Amino acid sequence: MNEVIREWVEKAEGDYFSAFREYRARKRPNYNAACFFAQQCAEKYLKAILQSRGIAFAKTHDLVVLLGLPPFEG
């Protein structure tokens, strides 16, 4: 795994733990933040996969756009 892919994965995992922490909070959980971090996590994992396959992608936060690129396209 090269450094760029490793960075995407590390950032995705940070977002995962932030989403999980917000979701599981006993006092004043912030479900909006949990959803935001979950989306960010998915986005960064998708970008890591694309990067690992040498597929270029534009700067976007749109999961549908990312999922329309190979190797995810239908």
Image: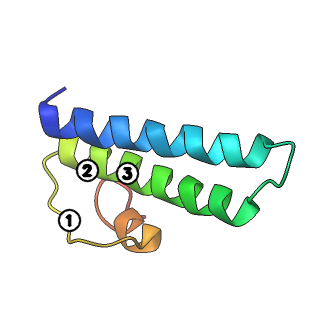
State the residue in front, 51 or 6.
Answer: 6
- Residue 16 is left or right of residue 1, and the answer is right
Residue carrying label 1: 57
Q: Residues within 10 Å of mark 3 (few under 14, many from 20)?
A: many
Amino acid of disc 1: Phe
Residue carrying label 3: 44
Q: Residues within 10 Å of mark 2 (few under 14, many from 20)?
A: many
Disc assigned to residue 50:
2
Could you tell me which quadrant the N terminus lies in?
top left
Which residue is drawn at the image coordinates 23% and 71% (left, top)? 59
- Residue 6 is left or right of residue 37, and the answer is left
- Residue 61 is left or right of residue 8, and the answer is right
Earlier along the polypeptide chain: callout 1 or callout 3?
3
Q: Is residue 37 above or below residue 8?
A: below
Could you tell me which quadrant the C terminus lies in?
bottom left
Amino acid of disc 2: Leu
